[in-house]
Amino acid sequence: MAKCYSDWPPIPPLHPSRRTPPQSHASPCAIRRQVASFVLHCSRSCASPLLEPTKNLPDEFPAVPAAAPVSPPLPDAALKLGISNKFIRGFCSDPQTEQLAFECYRRALLQPGFLPEKKTANALTVQLLRAKQWGSLELLVEDFRAYGVLPEKRTCARLVACCIRARQFGLADAVLGVLKAKKGAPAVMAFAAAMQAYNKLHMYRSTVLLYGQARVARLPLSTDGYRAAMAACAALGEPDMVASLFKLYRSQKWHPSEDSGEAYAIVCDAMGKAGRALDALRCLREMEADGLSPDAAIYSSVIGALADAREKAAAEDLYHEAWDSKMLGDPDMFLKLTVMHVEAGVVEETIEVAKDMRQIGLRVTDCILSTIINGFVKRRGLKPAIRAYDKLVFIGCEPGQVTYASVINVYCRLGRSDRAEAVFSEMIGRGFEKCVVAYGNMISMYGKIRRASEAMKLLAMMKQKGCEPNVLVYNSLLDMHGRLGNAKQAEKIWKEMARRKVRPDQISYTGIILANNRAGELHRCVELYQEFREAGGKVDKSMAGLMAGVFSKCSRFNELIELLKDMNATKLDRRLYMSVLRSLRDAGLEVHVKWLKSNFTFVEEKT
């Protein structure tokens, strides 16, 4: 039921009476709140067919059509008071009343002749965005379409960007649809903001779709929009599309500026990542011809692309140019240069790259150091690699875990156990306690020099530090015990592998079979071999040599012949060939001797 007029609250005075004492003057904010309370109370209490069925009004209100809005009968006092655009904007500007602004605006739409103004739409949009009231914003956007009014262009751009950041993609599409129909500066700025927002979410295909919509609608793009579209195509690996967009970008009113430099950077990076290093270099030269100076990022991108393409001369020329301009500072670019020098065989240049990094105050990364050491090992040998390591340490480079592991491996291969132990201790002292490769190299070295106790101590230390041994570590231990003929220790290692669920490989089986063979456990050797074959393992020359001896000792010639048949396409070494031949002759199997001679050949071992 509607309340009678006598039940309405009194209308607060808009202007304080002169008779009112000064201390009782109400502030404008208080007056505005009282008026808002009165208007909303009146509109809620009137007998309206739209509002009567429910006692509690929802927070969101249905959209009001623009053409001939049907307004419910309002009380005379409310009609006389009215709600103006200025009144609504006043609500938006006051933090204490801004939450009532949109409700007041929806009531105002019910007034005959009320039309929202641009400033009102702008104020409401800003307030609703601040409060993240997406449902109310949907209604407001429908009013934009219905009444043909839009906020300021910057507010439109902010609205679209905020919707995308909040994953309100449907609302963002609705706003763009309204703006696309109106065209003009708000649409141009909003489309650019939307594409930039999608790029930040790595939704590059959505950016490309927006670009297509703008082209279909014949909506001109801003420079920000072009750069966003170029960046999206570059991220999608479409260098040709990037080049086409860049031509369109330059066909606009072209004034070389900082923004133009950003566009050039996108093109250079896209061409470089696509493997078109020379095109990236040409783009850089065009940039210089336009009077723009490349920054450090562009230099790094193009130099890295040239290094990846192994364009050594061009990469070095541009590197020296950037060095003179003091535009170098990207460690990734230095890594690519290092790899290029290694692949080109001029590993001495890698030391100069490290010196340049130290000179400009950059830390030579562990990846670069290990690349240099491994490059020297590959191109110059073990001893030159150690000399290179000493030079790098001398100029102030700090090795990391990977570099330490590489150097330990070099010393182990040189047989310098004392130096390997010293470097390993230094590595542990610097906190690199969980390098499986370094532990594996040290254990392998101890195995080769028959220091089994040291190897087992290192294994215990490894597990104590929380570093889980892998199959390579266990293979080194099995090989060591196999060479020593220590079948018991080898079996312990084998059981530990099973307990830790480390799957053995071909080398593992070869090691455990070797240990049991030397200990005379021939039946165990056959058992392990059958297990290996049942698991789908393929026999190589090492295992074939072992099992040929085992089968010969056990007089299991049928299995020996089957083993040889499996290796029919493999050339045997002289030692294995002669061993099998003698075994067959001793057993009096002349038929099999002839078969062996006719089907197998042997190669001389290299000395």
Image: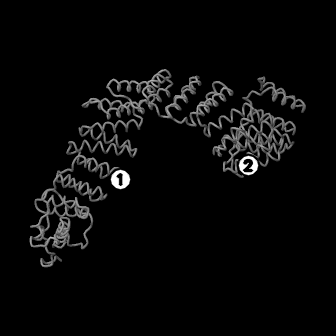
Q: What amino acid is found at the position of numbered circle 2 in the picture?
A: Ala
Residue 561 in percent (x, y) is at: 80, 34
Badge 2 is on which residue? 460
Q: Earlier in the sequence, mark 1 or mark 2?
A: 1
Badge 1 is on which residue? 166
Quadrant of the snapshot with the N terminus: bottom left
**Camera-side residue: 285 or 72?**
285
Colouring chosen for the image of the structure? one colour
Position of 322 with respect to 106 (left or right) is: right
Residue 365 in percent (x, y) is at: 55, 36
Residue 172 in percent (x, y) is at: 30, 50
* Vertical order, 372 against 94 (above or below): above
Dividing the picture into quadrants, the one containing residue 70 is bottom left
Mark 2 lies on a secondary structure that is helix
Q: What amino acid is found at the position of numbered circle 1 in the picture?
A: Ala
Q: CA distance from mark 1 to mark 2?
A: 53 Å
**Camera-side residue: 304 or 247?**
304
Q: Which residue lies at the image location 71% right of the left edge and 44% below the top edge? A: 504
Mark 1 lies on a secondary structure that is loop
Visible residue check, residue 335: no
Quadrant of the snapshot with the C terminus: top right
* Vertical order, 324 against 526 (above or below): above
Position of 464 with respect to 242 (left or right) is: right
Instruction: Check disc 1: other Cα within 10 Å, few if <14, some if 14-19, many if 20+.
Output: few
